[in-house]
Image: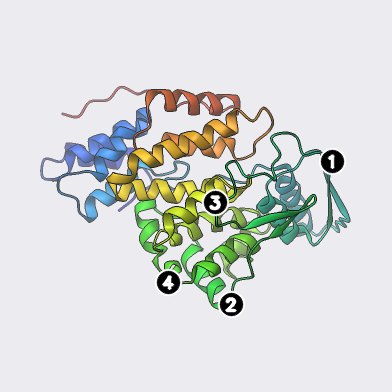
Amino acid sequence: MITEDVDEELRRLAKDRKFPHREAARRGLRFRSSGDVADLVAIVDDPHPCGMTEVVFAMAGSTKPWLNWVPMPGESICLAANQIAAQRAQGETVDVRRIVQSAAEPPSALVAARKVVGDVEVETRAFPEPDIRVPVRRPGKYAIWRYDGVRPVPAVGEPSAEAVAALHAVGEETWPSLLSGYLQAAPLGELALDELLGLLAHLPGPPDTQRWKNLARSTPTYWYRLLGPWVCLGMLHHAARRQVLLDLAFGVEDWVCDAALFALVTLAYREPQHRREVRDLVRARLDAAVSAGRVVTIEESLAHLMLITPGCTASDHAKARGVLARHGIRAPRRRRWMIV
């Protein structure tokens, strides 16, 4: 039921006196115009939830970061890899022997770039403080990376072919909404935890479908960014979900940090008793990124995540908007509208 003109469809539903969830549709419109997450939460907390309220929730979040799609990789090494892939797709011969980074970037970004370009040498000239190799909080029980000097190394074994197949079946597309994404990720939850951690560390290649063949010509690193949140949604179906996701969120700086927090935000929508804790965790991780005093490539995506976290306060909103403004992303314009 999600149409191309989501706003028009929500307005139609909000006016339809026979539609039992008119208030949810109004809330969806308000969220899309103002960005106030309280309106989004109100849709989930509808006193008579059903499949239709989930459709309204999906419409409210359509085209919004994390609600409907995962932010694109912004690391310099991934941008370089995408450019090289695009040139090769045009028939150019591009021989890459070494990539030089002025400063360290997340290990998942490094692995993604190598998957695209080839197993090239990567020289990292600096590890500015706070050192990206050091967990944000004390090392936890679960981790997917360790460092051998300046080189990131997977801390877990490779996933099985069955685990990779399950990931391909689940994660070929982004989710219509995080609520449906949780349900779609259930088959991943049937895998052993070690398999899920292995998927995060070893980043298997994309499904052999036309969609990903097309993206391989322009933005091939996107698959490797997308798979992490899918795997973390799968972890929500495990008994040890909280501890695993906490350890990953506050481990070494990596794509898996915001992927783990995204899964916890999804949990907060589904289970209100977790909302206060999850809000505190997302704000703490955003604060750590902002206070780093150096480039933190996941800072922007953490800000987007803060804005959709249940319980996001005015202070949280201002903090996240400040980050996005520094990255050149403007707040949505408040539009006047009335339902009669």
Point out residue 140 in the picture as x, y percentages from the top left corner: 56, 52
- N-terminal-most mark, 3 or 2: 2
- Cα gap from disc 4 to disc 2, whole angstroms: 15 Å
Other residues around mark 4 within 10 Å, as few (<14) / some (14–19) / many (≥20): some
Point out residue 18 in the picture as x, y percentages from the top left corner: 10, 45
Q: In terms of depth relative to the viewer, which is nearer, 285 or 26?
A: 285
- Cα gap from disc 3 to disc 4, whole angstroms: 20 Å
Q: Which type of secondary structure does the marked residue at label 4 adopt?
A: loop
Q: Are marks 1 and 3 in contact (CB under 8 Å)?
A: no
- N-terminal-most mark, 1 or 4: 1
Q: Do the residues labelled 3 and 2 touch (CB within 8 Å)?
A: no
Residue 177 seen in render: no
Q: Do the residues labelled 1 and 4 touch (CB within 8 Å)?
A: no
Question: Is 267 displayed left or right of 66 in the figure?
Answer: left
Q: What residue type is labelled 4?
A: Glu
The structure residue drawn at horizontal position 27% and vertical position 25%, both measured from the top left corner, is 337
Pointer 2 residue: 161
- N-terminal-most mark, 3 or 4: 4
- N-terminal-most mark, 1 or 3: 1
Mark number, residue 125: 1
Mark number, residue 248: 3
Q: Nearer the viewer, mark 2 or mark 1?
A: 1
Pointer 4 residue: 190
Position of the C terminus by quadrant: top left
Q: Nearer the viewer, mark 3 or mark 4?
A: 3
- Cα gap from disc 3 to disc 2, whole angstroms: 24 Å
Question: Is 198 displayed left or right of 154 in the figure?
Answer: left
